[in-house]
Amino acid sequence: MLINQYQNNLIYKSSGKRINVPIELEFQIKIEKGGKLLSPLSVFEGNLYIQSDDYLACVDCSRKAILWEKEGGQRFGFPRDGHSGKIFLTADGKPACFETHTGQEKWILPDPETIVGASKYSILCYARKANPRALVCRSKVNGEELWRIPLKFGAPGAIAISGDIYVVQALKGIFIGQLQSGETIRQESSSDLLKRFFPNQTFRYWSIGPLVDDHLYVGFDSDNDKQNGVLICLSVSNGDLIWSYEMNSRAQPGRILYDGGKVYFDINPGWGSDNWLTCIDATTGELIYKTEENFTASGCANPIIVDNYFIGGYGKEVAFFDLDKQKFIWRYRHKHNKFVFGGSLIAFGGYLIASDISEKEIYWFKFN
């Protein structure tokens, strides 16, 4: 289960070193162990974590050297969080904590749960086999249960966290609560939410973006050719609609990012080559600009904002958009016919790290 988390509105926002384009491929490795596919890459405290089925490895980002690896025993999920010398992940279908530098197990819980998010002091888990199925908040110290709330709208699809407030996008609804107390602020089905704001329209898919103070950004795509997709800004405290922005097609916003009082989004990759960038005023919902060019011919998946660049790509192409100059300043096309930019993108320590999830290859592109 792949779950996106917008934690404190940062998605690899800090690169460790100022980046400069162009980039050039400096190093690549192929993972021969594990399953058929790579899971999303993650970086915590300067270490890159690589996971594929029953294989888990910790790599020093700067030296590109494997610090430790595990294989052939447990089946792993990719690490959800890491700090103070510990990482938190799902192992054999149960929440677990490992030491960063050695990979030694600190604790693993007995009951089947999947870690779906993390805050500074706690992890959020989906108790998929409990009756009823529930969202469980646990201490990072020892995995102790702090509170539990039934999830009546299905399995979590995405998590947004800001301070003490968390938002869970489930299959058929949204759940908002307080992390420390477990108190529920509100829960509502996606159909009821849409009927309140768009009583005469219908939508298919939806996705949440970052939570910034009281504002949650949510995107929807249309289910017919007679109406357009929308991006809305929702107050999590009272459920009111703050503003809505109508797309000029049925398309759904892809990854929604917040930076400097502005909301940025590309187009969901499912809509093919229409992958222009849109910039919206986060307070008013007014359009600031929209690019006339696509990011790449193939699409734009898992974009990031780093050092005032919006970076996104797909397949063997990646593009850099300068948010100050409001224009594309550089594009890169990999010389081999590989899906280099199909997985997660990470900017760290002067490198752009990308992965081909099917070929199980990881690439370090150096910023010049």
Image (cartoon, grey):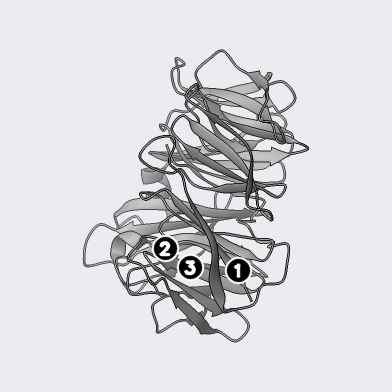
Q: Rounded to the nearest whole Å, what is the CA distance between mark 2 and mark 1?
A: 30 Å
Q: Rounded to the nearest whole Å, what is the CA distance between mark 1 and mark 3?
A: 16 Å
Q: Which residue is mark 2?
A: 253
- Foreground tag (1 vs 3): 1
Kind of residue sitting beneath label 3: Gly
Task: Give the SS element for disc 2.
Answer: strand
Q: Decide: is 67 above or below 73.
A: below
Query: Neighbour class for label 1 at 10 Å: few (<14), some, many (≥20)?
Result: many
Q: Nearer the viewer, residue 251 or 245?
A: 251
Any part of residue 242 in sight: no
Task: Give the SS element for disc 3.
Answer: strand
Q: Which residue is mark 1?
A: 366
**Is tag 2's residue or tag 1's residue first in the polypeptide sequence?**
2
Task: Determine which of the numbered discs, if any, sits on residue 312 in the image.
Answer: 3
Q: Decide: is 17 above or below 159.
A: below
Kind of residue sitting beneath label 2: Pro
Mark 3 and mark 1 in contact (Cβ < 8 Å)? no
Q: Position of residue 335 (x, y in %)?
A: 38, 72
Q: Position of residue 289 (x, y in %)?
A: 50, 82
Q: Position of residue 34 (x, y in %)?
A: 43, 34
**Is tag 2's residue or tag 3's residue first in the polypeptide sequence?**
2
Quick check: 255 left or right of 8?
A: left
Quick check: 80 left or right of 133?
A: right
Q: Name the residue at 58% across, 55% down.
A: 210
Kind of residue sitting beneath label 1: Lys
Query: Neighbour class for label 2 at 10 Å: few (<14), some, many (≥20)?
Result: many
Q: Nearer the viewer, residue 189 or 149?
A: 149
**Is tag 1's residue or tag 3's residue first in the polypeptide sequence?**
3
Q: Name the residue at 42% across, 63% down.
A: 253
